[in-house]
Image (cartoon, rainbow, N blue to C red):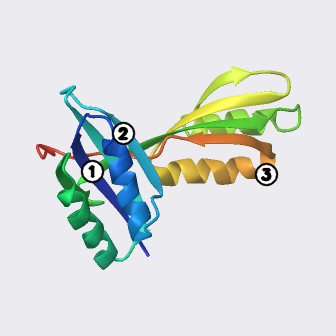
């Protein structure tokens, strides 16, 4: 199964996100992550969707998205031409035994410790999904308590723009 990142430019109106998400539900497709936010023009929003599947499934999703009334443009972003980032907050058990390991890993991954108590540390990590996943793997043996991830946001490199 391949991983795909779609950028969807939509009117910033009530119910658009519901229609986009419903399309996936009706077709039986799963969304790995979905982020949405207002663009430089407050009349429009950008939805970034990540999903797994084959080329045919991705093509069908793109075609169906293009048919939705409030969708203005849909673009499949390629690995070579996109910049992709994600934000994660992760809470780790803090003890005298693992404190140095947590702090060293945070430094290596250029993460920020944003909350510190005698029992727990909350760390902010930003980067490509592979970096986020690698940080989780390092923290797993140290005692992950909670994780909250934003999902991917992505733009095309260089002069290419969605609209």
Of residues 102 and 119, the one drawn nearer to the viewer in this rendering: 119
**Residue beneath disc 2:** 36
Residue 97 percent across, percent down from the top left: 88, 37
Q: Earlier in the sequence, mark 1 or mark 3?
A: 1
User: Where on the picture, by quarter, is residue 63?
Assistant: bottom left
- For mark 1, does the 10 Å Cα neighbourhood hold few (<14), some (14 to 19), or many (20 or more) residues? many
Question: Can see residue 51?
Answer: no
Q: Quadrant of the N terminus?
A: bottom left
Of residues 111 and 129, the one drawn nearer to the viewer in this rendering: 129
**Residue beneath disc 3:** 141
Per the rendering, the mark at residue 26 is none
Per the rendering, the mark at residue 7 is 1
Using residue 133 as the reference point, say whether residue 155 is left or right of it: left
Cα distance between the residues tagged 1 and 3: 35 Å
> Of the residues tagged 2 and 3, which is closer to the observer?
2
> Of the residues tagged 1 and 3, which is closer to the observer?
1
User: Where on the picture, by quarter, is residue 163?
Assistant: top left
Of residues 76 and 8, the one drawn nearer to the viewer in this rendering: 8
User: Where on the picture, by quarter, is residue 96?
Assistant: top right
- For mark 3, does the 10 Å Cα neighbourhood hold few (<14), some (14 to 19), or many (20 or more) residues? few
| Callout 2: SS | strand
């Amino acid at each position: 199964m391949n991983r795909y990142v779609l950028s969807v430019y939509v009117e910033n109106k009530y119910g658009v996100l519901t229609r986009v998400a419903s399309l996936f539900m009706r077709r039986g497709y799963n969304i790995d992550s979905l982020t949405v936010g207002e663009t430089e023009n407050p009349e429009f929003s950008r939805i970034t969707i990540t999903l797994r599947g084959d080329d045919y499934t991705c093509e069908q999703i793109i075609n169906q998205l293009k048919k939705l009334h409030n969708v203005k443009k849909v673009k499949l972003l390629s690995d070579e031409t996109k910049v992709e980032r994600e934000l994660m907050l992760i809470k780790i058990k803090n003890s005298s035994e693992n404190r140095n390991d947590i702090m060293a890993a945070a430094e290596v991954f250029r993460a920020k410790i944003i909350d510190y108590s005698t029992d727990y540390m909350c760390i902010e990590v930003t980067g490509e999904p592979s970096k986020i996943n690698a940080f989780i793997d390092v923290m797993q043996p140290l005692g992950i308590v909670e994780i909250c991830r934003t999902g991917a946001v992505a733009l095309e490199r260089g002069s290419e723009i969605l609209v």
